[in-house]
Amino acid sequence: MPSHLVAPSLLAADFTQLQSEIEMFNASSADWLHYDTMDGQFVPNLSLGLGMLKAVRKMTTKPIDAHLMIERPERHIEAFRDAGADQITVHQEACTHLHRVIQQIKATGAKAGVAINPATPVSSIFDVLEEVDIILIMSVNPGFGGQKFIYRAINKIEALKSEMMTRNLNPHIVVDGGVGLQNAQKILQAGANVLVAGSAVFKASDPSEAIRQLKDVGHEIAHWA
């Protein structure tokens, strides 16, 4: 059985066919639905707000993984939880008081995550490793789908996994951006255990099969016990 999870990114879906896209996701072997919210401030794009989240929540029982690429996310944590997010990830770069925001997320009953951009050192989140359920390594610069994977992310995953093993911690290590069959095995070997895939799933000729193939990558990898 695969030891890792696959989280298709709704950002890459065809929104004119949203219901059928969610039905495909529901019937597939995917584990989480990754939901990217962008505010046009923290990143140069706008996407997927609370109204869409409420609609999507009615269509699936699988976990919704909200990735908030927004300034001052503490203003919106409760609203995203109320709209249906099971997991809420905020950016280290967007939080003046990161520890406080993590506690705010946990107080809602959601799982708490922290994300870092490609130019942010992984050591910047070492002080909150004990507090989080999810650590998201951006392997593209956030804001747009369809970008190429930045391979320096592999080094960050390895450094993070090493630090976690030293401390005997096991939050999920999520990798987001340019993920597909061409690099999934390297990502998993480095120590990640959740693959966020947008274009590799929703732009595929058979999205359900693309998810299955991502789930089947690296059966021999026992990096994540």
Image: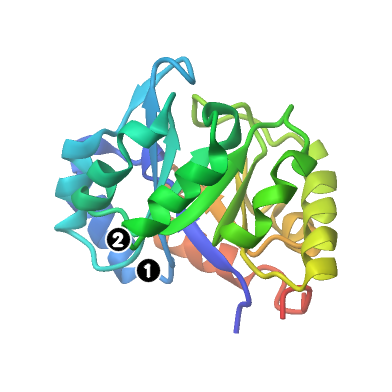
Is 215 situated left or right of 9 in this image? right
Residue 22 in sight in this render = yes
For label 1, count other residues whose C-alpha is less than 10 Å away and answer few (under 14), some (14-19) or many (20+): some
Task: Identify the residue position indicated by label 1 in the image.
Answer: 28
Is 139 situated left or right of 56 in this image? right
Q: In this view, does 138 lie above or below 105?
A: above
Question: Image point 77% across, 51% down: which residue?
Answer: 157
Question: Image point 47% across, 15% down: which residue?
Answer: 44
Q: Please name the amino acid that badge 2 sits on.
A: Met
User: The N terminus is located in which quarter?
Assistant: bottom right
Q: Position of residue 82 (x, y in %)?
A: 20, 51
Q: How many numbered circles does the render carry?
A: 2
Q: Position of residue 90 (x, y in %)?
A: 49, 40
Q: Please name the amino acid that badge 1 sits on.
A: Ser
Asked whether 52 or 86 is in front, the reply is 86
Q: Where is residue 219 in the image (x, y as percent from the top left)?
A: 70, 78
Q: Are marks 1 and 2 in contact (CB under 8 Å)?
A: yes
Residue 177 in sight in this render = no
Is 65 situated left or right of 49 in this image? right
Q: Which mark is residue 13?
A: none
Q: In which quarter of the image is residue 224?
A: bottom right
User: The C terminus is located in which quarter?
Assistant: bottom right
Query: Helix, strand, or loop for circle 1?
Result: loop
Query: Helix, strand, or loop for circle 2?
Result: helix
For label 2, count other residues whose C-alpha is less than 10 Å away and answer few (under 14), some (14-19) or many (20+): some
Asked whether 186 or 126 is in front, the reply is 126
Question: Image point 43% across, 67% down: which residue?
Answer: 31
Q: Where is residue 63 in the image (x, y as percent from the top left)?
A: 35, 64
Q: In this view, does 76 lie above or below 218?
A: above
Q: Which mark is residue 24?
A: 2
Q: In this view, does 52 lie above or below 190?
A: above
